[in-house]
Amino acid sequence: MGRIAVIGAGMGAMAAAARLAVAGHRVVVYERAATYGGAVRRFERDGFTFDTGPGLLPLPAVYRDLFVKTGKEPLEACVELVQVDPSSRHVFAEGTEVDLPNASRAGVVTALDEALGAGAGARWGDFLVRAREAWDRTRRPLLEEPLWPNWSVLAEREPYPSVPHKKLLRTRRATTLAEVGAWELRDPRLTALLESHALAHGLDPRVAPASAAVLPYMEHAFGTWYVRGGIRELARAVYERCVARRVEFVFGAEVTGIVEKDGRATGVELADGEVADADFVVAGVAPGALDTLVPGTALRGGDEIAPQRGAPSRLTVLLALRGGRPEGVAHRTVVHAADRTEELDRLFGERPGFSSSPTVTVSRPDDPALAPGAEHEAVTLSVTVPSGLSVSEADVEGVLGVAERAIPGLRDRLLWHEVRTPADFAEETAADGGAVPAPALAAADGGLLHASNTTRMPGLFVVGGWAHPGGGLPHAGMSGALVSGLIVEGPQFRGSQ
């Protein structure tokens, strides 16, 4: 078997490394930082512990499969998974609140009817049925198979079966997520609920394809899960599985170039001048970082999918609170923007900036390990913001003001707070402006597809959120499986069956 150099120790890169090591390859991971996990990091201070990246795990089957395929211990033997219920609480602009049960269509329908009025639940339930059809049509090509050579089929075909909408003498079908909300859900609160799923992934619902309906469907169908101790524990478990499979990690090792011979990748060059030979190179880095490693453009382009360059980032505010976590508090509360149009214009308009009243996601895990004692609580606030945005203290104060709608008396309880800006995400991930990649979606002329895991340079593969099938914890794990299959089985690999 061959020698494989992996650049970066993000979740997708580690998933690929573990699978390749089990297949008999000698795998060495070179990570410029002092730790593993990529964007899945942890911040600790005064006995408080916070996830600074993703806080919840959708579609845990991806990592269950990774652990089954790479060892005898299943995922649940390495981390404790907890199904979050309610899945989320939503606080709408006009003050209505609703708790949505986890993975229960009947429960969600009932909750929406009680909170928003009769008929609201049925409209959302019918939407989920159509979203499932979109999921069934796109699951394999978007998540389980290498990117098709004829990817344009995915780009042109809208898989969401929208309901015909009559307006004057014309009949139209929704092509964007915003149109799905306006024409099929017909309630500004249901529309806000739908669009919040796109916003959480940095997508503008006004232009995101109707196929983005799969995002709320995935959460509904497969549940929302928390890893006891924080998502960083999942990164630890994957790292330890790699080590158990004899993957070698070299931290503090910055790769400055990919060695090429006769047009093929044959190793990596490190900042200290060392050259590590390899039969294959797997790069788990953002496109801008890869540009500096390879002369010319190695990623697919032209008539193929070019790498995505640019996406919104995240502002994360970590709160250390006096007073314990009250009973009945939801793990995740989404406080919706008072003015969604203003928020979207500030996020995606020609002059990006910070919204005066953004959508804020409040994370309050029921996990004693995160606070120094029962008399304290660790809370995380997350906001989607333009990449590269400079965040002021006034911006942070605005976020705290919005969060008070979910945490009454917040400022009286506040011991201290830490702010993680797009610049911090850029430092951790080397993504331009701290951009966070979105998952791949069909339609939209291919604008939300990601570059193939193979490249124009034989022997060089790309993995992680900036490659097919895109961003998010499940998608990172899937990219690792795809890259492993392409290396082990060759170009004929067609994904898991």
Image (cartoon, rainbow, N blue to C red):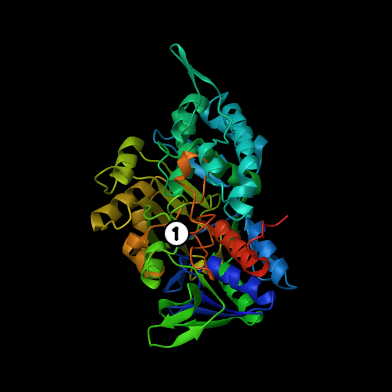
Residue reaching furthest to the front: 262
Regarding residue 193, the answer to whether it shows in the image is yes
**Quadrant of residue 436 within the rendered picture:** bottom left
Between 303 and 15, the residue placed more toward the observer is 303
Task: Examine the rendered structure and indicate whether residue 409 appears above or below residue 111.
Answer: below
Residue 268, horizontal then vertical, whole percent:
46, 79
Total marks placed: 1
Between 142 and 114, the residue placed more toward the observer is 142
Q: Residue at x 66, y 60 (%)?
A: 493
Residue reaching furthest to the top: 169
**Quadrant of residue 11 within the rendered picture:** bottom right
Residue 2, horizontal then vertical, whole percent:
62, 79
Q: Residue at x 55, y 69 (%)?
A: 235
Regarding residue 84, the answer to whether it shows in the image is no
Task: Examine the rendered structure and indicate whether residue 230 appears above or below residue 410.
Answer: below
Q: Residue at x 43, y 88 (%)?
A: 274
Say left or right for 418 vs 82: left
Q: Secondary structure at mark 1?
A: strand
**Quadrant of residue 424 within the rendered picture:** bottom left
Residue 54, horizontal then vertical, whole percent:
49, 59
Residue reaching furthest to the right: 72
Say left or right for 25 vs 365: right
Residue 430, horizontal then vertical, whole percent:
38, 67
Say which amino acid is labelled 1.
Answer: Val
- Return the residue at label 1: 379
Indicate the quadrant containing the N terminus: top left, top right, bottom left or bottom right.
bottom right
Say left or right for 287 vs 394: right
Indicate the quadrant containing the C terminus: top left, top right, bottom left or bottom right.
bottom right
Between 436 and 494, the residue placed more toward the observer is 494
Q: Residue at x 35, y 45 (%)?
A: 358
Q: Residues within 10 Å of mark 1 (few under 14, many from 20)?
A: many
